[in-house]
Image: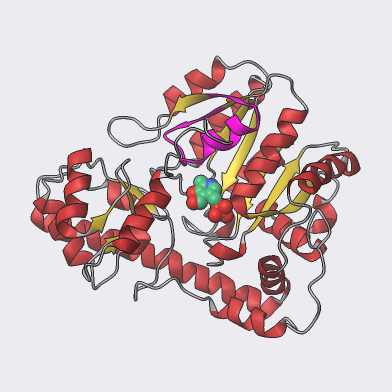
Amino acid sequence: MFKNLPDYVEDPILGLFDAYRADVRTRKVNLGIGIYCDEDGRVPVLASVRAARERIDGTEPCIYLPTEGLPGYRNAVRELVFGGATTDLQERVVTIQTAGGTGALRIGAEFLASTNTKPQICMPDPTWVNHQAIFQAAGFEVSHYPYCTPDGRFDIDGALATFKALPAGTVVLLHPCCHNPTGIDPSREEWGRLLDAIAQRALLPFFDMAYQGFAEGLDDDAWAVRECARREMPCLVASSYSKNFSLYGERVGALSIHAPGLEVAKVLGQLKVIVRRSYSCPPAQGAMLVATVLQDVQLHAQWRAELDGMRLRMLGVRASLHALLTRELPDADLSFLTRQRGMFSYSGLSGAQIERLRSRHGVYVVSSGRICIAGINASNIAQVCEALVETGFKPR
Ligand SMILES: Cc1ncc(COP(=O)(O)O)c(C=O)c1O
């Protein structure tokens, strides 16, 4: 029984994390997995979240949540994503609580596949390693649009040319901020042109927002989503609270579907059907924490300040890395380090350099050359720089 199963192919990022954990060297640096670490190299417990945890009465029985999630959480995250007040949003946006951003993508993919016999999606090349698998598993045919130019900028011409050749109804996957893995985001002017092309070709944007607040701030980072809504264009949004609340294991996310004239009850009903047959209802604890923080004026302000702190620390790391490497490599163009945003930087490291970084220096980088900036701090930045220089790192 079960003899003809295919061999398991390790997820490249999770596999690297396991290898890092198994490495017995003390001077090792994890720049692989997308987890934010603070200046002490620790995954932070946010003070706002700790305070929310204290407020939640742990003695209450934990019964099943509604299939679509906690009402207070759904309203609060819908406001965070779209801006504005629930009273204005509830007629045109359906939001459900999901198991992380991944769960939102999967439920959204299944919902779209249920409305289309030949679902197609066009996603950036490169994109987050899990995107293709999630949409293929839901029955989508996957194609790609080019994302970066050889000099490390957003490839607006390549993306527009691809969009203009897509059949109407194709879903287009977009990262509204902190593109994973490159850290390269379109400018507002470029977003405007992308949305124009999407509207002209009657394509359907699916935003994957896993890093709201990590690029410029909570509102600026949601600009593309809100502009899409302002233009009264339909869209889907998968939002994750793993990174910006530092609640990775709690699995807190949301799927929102926006459309003018949306048949709210019907859309919500179909989403509930998909959730019910998949996992029945979402987990409670993480959503209770996020809802408590977002609904309390004081905790909300405290969380925003903590999030700003994480964002500014990453900017500081980028500036320091840039300064240190410039000293060692004065002729190299290192401007990509400070131009790219969020947790990731696309380094252009070769496979051999990535291997040497790991084996010789204990510095773990994923095979695409993506560096997790949030894994660098004052105590390991010199080691990272030395290792990069020793491996012959030559930026584009
Ligand atoms: C672009 C992108 N989308 C979605 C996710 C998944 O988020 P979550 O951990 O909340 O499922 C990630 C996580 O790394 C990501 O980078």
Total marks shown come to: 0
**Residue 387 location, x and y as percent?**
15, 56
User: Residue 182, located in which quarter of the rendered image?
Assistant: top left
User: Residue 311, located in which quarter of the rendered image?
Assistant: bottom left
Question: Of 226 and 289, which appears nearest the observer?
Answer: 289
Q: Is residue 307 left or right of residue 315?
A: right
- Whether residue 86 is visible, yes or no, is yes
User: Residue 61, located in which quarter of the rendered image?
Assistant: bottom right
Q: Is residue 133 magenta?
A: yes
Q: In the orientation shown, which residue stands out farthest toward the front?
A: 1
- Above or below for 28 versus 334: below
- Above or below for 37 versus 362: below
Q: Is residue 211 left or right of residue 18?
A: right
Q: Residue at x 83, y 43 (%)?
A: 273
**Residue 71 location, x and y as percent?**
82, 62
**Residue 296 location, x and y as percent?**
71, 76
Q: Quadrant of the C terminus?
A: top left
**Residue 77 location, x and y as percent?**
70, 59
Q: Residue at x 76, y 50 (%)?
A: 95
Q: Quadrant of the N terminus?
A: top right
The colour scheme used here is secondary structure
Report the span colored magenta.
122-142
Q: Is residue 87 magenta?
A: no
- Above or below for 394 versus 324: above
- Whether residue 31 is visible, yes or no, is no
